[in-house]
Amino acid sequence: MNKMKTEHHFAEQTFSMVKSFATHGNLLDFSALEGLAESKNLDDVLVKLRGTIYAEVVSSLEPPLTSSKFEMSFHKHLSQIHHKLLKVTPNNEILTAYYLKYIASNLKILLKGRAQNKSNEEISKHLDMHAEELIGRRDLIVKALSSENIKQTITLLENSEFGDDAISALDIFEKTGKLQIFDIFIDKAYFDKILQAYNLKHKDDQRIRDIVAVDIDSFNSLAVLRGKLWNLESSEIKKMLISPFFDVSERNLMAMMDAESIVESIKILLGTAYRKIILPTENEEESLTGIEDGFRTIGYRRAFNPFLWDINGISIVLGAIKLTELEMRNLSAVSFGVEHHLGVKEIMSKLVLLK
């Protein structure tokens, strides 16, 4: 019996690796992305995508074409790839935790919409429930949509993994009026689940550690910087942080909080593994955007590394999901650029290219 279980586990793991390497192998190269960026309009983008692996992804798009429609199709495809790999991968707790990002994305849209007293119709047109449908979790968003105001929405989330952090977000929102506070606390709940899965099964896996570390370091660093930008109290910023800490230590984060200015806070990151993403600029918002983009690029590069060095392991599967996410971001950026008549060089400059 144990032999049969071992053989079944091995077969599942092998199939998972094959699917992951196939997903990685299907990513578009520089010339293909550049060809898309050279499109005259979105109709041209659609025609070109029909000649790629993404023909089925864009098959349901109908005129009038918009970059938002393309983005929704790409988002749906990403959740499908993630779900397929989730189903065929044994010991998949870390993949399950990362899957929460789709639910988190919808919750952030819903909470910010409700905080602005938007109607359900206005909010719903920005939601993509496909990921929830794949795992049978539509009820959380549907239930939250039944609320009449932001306080009632938060109450309806109480028994979910997002409940406590949603309450914290509302407390600070009522004081500051900053809608982005919902993004931070919903992401905090999401990353807390990732850390739980990491600590449970993957603490000795260096490749998984590398991927998780940049996600947590990015979240914590940007939470502190945005907290300072919004003039939050140190006690409020501390509520946003996730531990255990990785390459941006607790000492680094406390020093960033205590710094006299955003510029001084950012300088503290020069003493960490992320010094190369710090670019000199006087504009605080531009600095934060640059740092966020820098963390994201490092994260995607680390997701690529397992394909260079490993032939097995769950880091390959997580890497395939992350690289698919990168591809969808790049394709969304291309469609947006073409829609807004940006030049090819400008469009390509907005992409994260690993090869």
Image (cartoon, rainbow, N blue to C red):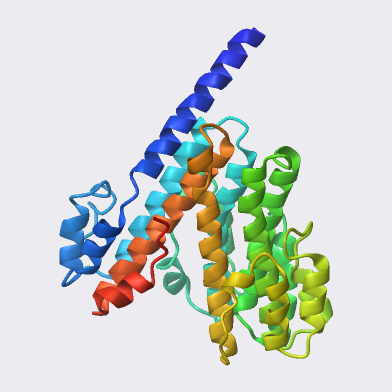
Quadrant (top left/top right/bottom left/bottom right) for the N terminus: top right
Quadrant (top left/top right/bottom left/bottom right) for the C terminus: bottom left
Residue 35 image offset from top left, x and y in percent: 21, 62
**Residue 230, can we see it?**
no
Query: Between 170 and 35, which is closer to the camera in this rendering?
Result: 35
Which quadrant of the figure has residue 234? Answer: bottom right
Residue 168 image offset from top left, x and y in percent: 75, 71
Which residue appears at 57% of the width and 21% of the height? 9
Which residue appears at 78% of the width and 71% of the height? 252
Q: Note whether 96 is above or below 354 in the view shown.
A: above
Which residue appears at 65% of the width and 86% of the height? 177
Residue 317 image offset from top left, x and y in percent: 51, 40
Q: Is residue 237 left or right of residue 207?
A: right
Numbered disc total: 0
Q: Note whether 170 is above or below 10 in the view shown.
A: below
Q: Is residue 24 left or right of residue 179?
A: left
Q: Is residue 15 left or right of residue 4?
A: left
Query: Between 60 and 21, which is closer to the camera in this rendering?
Result: 21
Query: Between 193 and 298, which is closer to the camera in this rendering?
Result: 298
**Residue 224, can we see it?**
yes
Residue 280 image offset from top left, x and y in percent: 57, 85
Which residue appears at 45% of the width and 63% of the height? 127
Query: Between 16 and 179, which is closer to the camera in this rendering?
Result: 16
